[in-house]
Image (cartoon, rainbow, N blue to C red):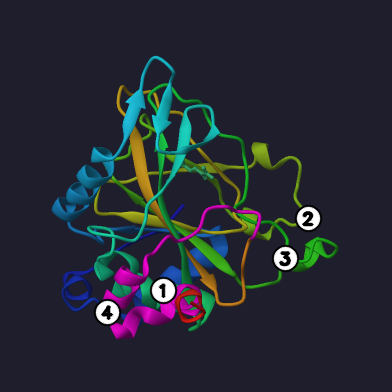
C-alpha cells in the first residue's frame, strides 16, 4: 500500500512541489487519511532539535516517568514545547513544502495550534486506539465521512523510528468510517515510522495509536497541529505557547499562522 512520497532533488532545492507530486500526495491522504514524506529535513538539523529536546528531559527509571510531560498512556508522555530557539525556526513550523500541502488539504486560512513532542519510554505498551478529534457534529456522525479534513497532526521523528522502537500504528481509511465502527481494531493497520528527516501526518479523524517500544531508548517525535482557522478543540489542553517577544520576531509572511497569539497580544 502506497502512502509515501519521496522528494526529487529539484523539489528539495526549490522547496516547491511538482504539481504531480501534489496531486499524488492529496490522493494518498484522501484515501488513507495519512501521508508520509521521505527526506524532507536534513538529518543533522533534526538531530540538533532532538538534542535540544532531550536536554530538557529527565527520565526517572525507578518511577518510570518523564519530566516535564503529561502521561497519556502506559509509558507515553506528551511534552509541550514553547516556540523558542531552536524550535522557532520557520523551516520547522512554516516549511514551504509542508505549508503548501497543508493549504491544499485545509484551505488557505490555516493556523499552527500546537507544538510539542510525544515520548514513548522503553518498554511502553501499545496505546489505546483513538482519533485526535471525532465527528464535528456529534448528532450527525455519518456526515463526517463526507467532509474534507479540518485539522492535521504532523509527526517528525527525532530519531530513526523502526517497527521495534515505537512506530505509530494507524488504520488506513478510518477517517471515513464514521459513525465509528466498533470492529476497527480488526481492520488492516499500518506502522508509520521513518528515519530522521522524514515526517508523516494524519487527519484528526484518522484512528491511530502509539506503538509499543521494545528498545532500550526513548522514542520521541515532534508534533505540530495545523487546523482550519475556525476549528478549536477546547477539550485539548495542549496549546501553542509563544511569548510576545518571540511573536515579534516571526517573519511577517508567517504571522498568519499565529493569529490567535496575535489577538491575545493585541488585547493586552
Ligand atoms: O506516540 C505515538 O506514536 C502517537 C501518540 C498519540 O497519538 C497520542 O499520544 O495521542
Instruction: Say which residue appears at 34% left-offset and 73% top-offset.
Output: 247
Q: Which mark is residue 136?
A: 3
> Sequence-wise, which precedes: disc 1 or disc 2?
1
The structure residue drawn at horizontal position 22% and vertical position 58%, both measured from the top left corner, is: 86
Q: Provide the residue designation for mark 1.
A: 101
Q: Relative to residue 8, is residue 254 depicted above or below?
A: below
- Among the two numbered marks 2 and 3 on one chain, the one whose residue lies closer to the N terminus: 3
* Between 27 and 238, the one nearer to me in the picture: 238
- Does mark 1 have its CB less than 8 Å from ligand 1? no
- Check contact, mark 1 vs mark 2: CB within 8 A: no
Q: Is mark 2 within 8 Å of ligand 1?
A: no
- Between the residue at mark 2 and the residue at mark 4, the CA separation in whole angstroms equals 37 Å
Along the polypeptide, which appears first: circle 1 or circle 3? 1
> Quick one: which residue is furthest to the front in this view?
268
Query: Residue 131: x, y in percent?
Result: 62, 50
Q: CA distance from mark 2 to mark 3?
A: 12 Å
Distance between the alpha carbons at the discs numbered 1 and 4? 10 Å
| Residue 215 located left or right of residue 142 | left
Q: Is residue 244 magenta?
A: yes
Q: Residues within 10 Å of mark 4 (few under 14, many from 20)?
A: some
Give the structural element (helix, strand or loop) at label 4: loop
Q: Residue furthest right?
A: 139
Q: With respect to residue 216, does 7 lie above or below?
A: below
Amino acid at each position: 500500500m502506497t502512502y509515501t512520497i519521496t522528494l526529487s532533488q529539484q523539489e528539495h532545492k526549490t522547496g516547491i512541489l511538482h504539481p504531480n507530486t501534489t496531486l499524488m500526495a492529496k490522493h494518498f491522504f484522501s484515501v488513507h487519511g495519512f501521508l508520509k514524506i521521505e527526506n524532507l529535513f536534513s538529518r543533522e538539523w533534526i538531530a540538533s532539535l532532538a538534542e535540544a529536546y532531550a536536554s530538557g528531559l529527565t527520565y526517572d527509571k525507578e518511577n518510570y516517568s518523564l519530566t516535564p510531560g503529561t502521561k497519556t498512556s502506559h509509558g507515553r508522555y506528551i511534552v509541550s514545547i514553547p516556540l523558542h530557539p531552536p524550535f522557532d525556526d520557520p523551516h520547522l513550523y512554516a516549511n514551504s513544502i509542508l505549508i503548501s500541502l497543508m493549504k491544499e488539504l485545509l484551505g488557505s486560512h490555516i493556523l499552527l495550534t500546537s507544538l510539542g513532542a510525544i515520548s514513548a519510554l522503553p518498554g511502553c505498551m501499545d496505546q489505546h486506539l483513538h482519533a485526535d478529534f471525532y465527528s464535528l457534529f456529534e448528532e450527525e456522525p455519518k456526515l463526517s465521512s463526507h467532509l474534507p479534513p479540518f485539522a492535521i497532526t504532523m509527526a517528525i521523528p527525532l530519531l530513526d523510528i523502526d517497527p521495534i522502537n515505537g512506530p505509530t500504528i494507524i488504520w488506513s481509511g478510518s477517517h471515513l468510517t464514521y459513525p465509528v465502527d466498533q470492529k476497527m481494531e480488526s481492520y488492516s493497520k499500518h506502522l508509520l515510522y521513518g528515519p530522521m528527516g522524514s515526517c508523516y501526518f494524519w487527519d484528526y479523524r484518522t484512528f491511530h495509536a502509539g506503538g509499543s517500544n521494545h528498545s532500550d531508548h526513548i522514542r520521541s517525535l515532534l508534533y505540530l497541529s495545523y487546523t482550519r482557522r475556525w476549528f478549536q478543540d477546547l477539550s485539548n489542553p495542549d496549546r501553542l505557547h509563544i511569548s510576545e517577544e518571540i511573536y515579534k520576531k516571526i517573519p511577517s509572511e508567517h504571522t498568519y499562522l499565529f493569529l490567535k497569539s496575535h489577538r491575545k497580544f493585541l488585547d493586552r
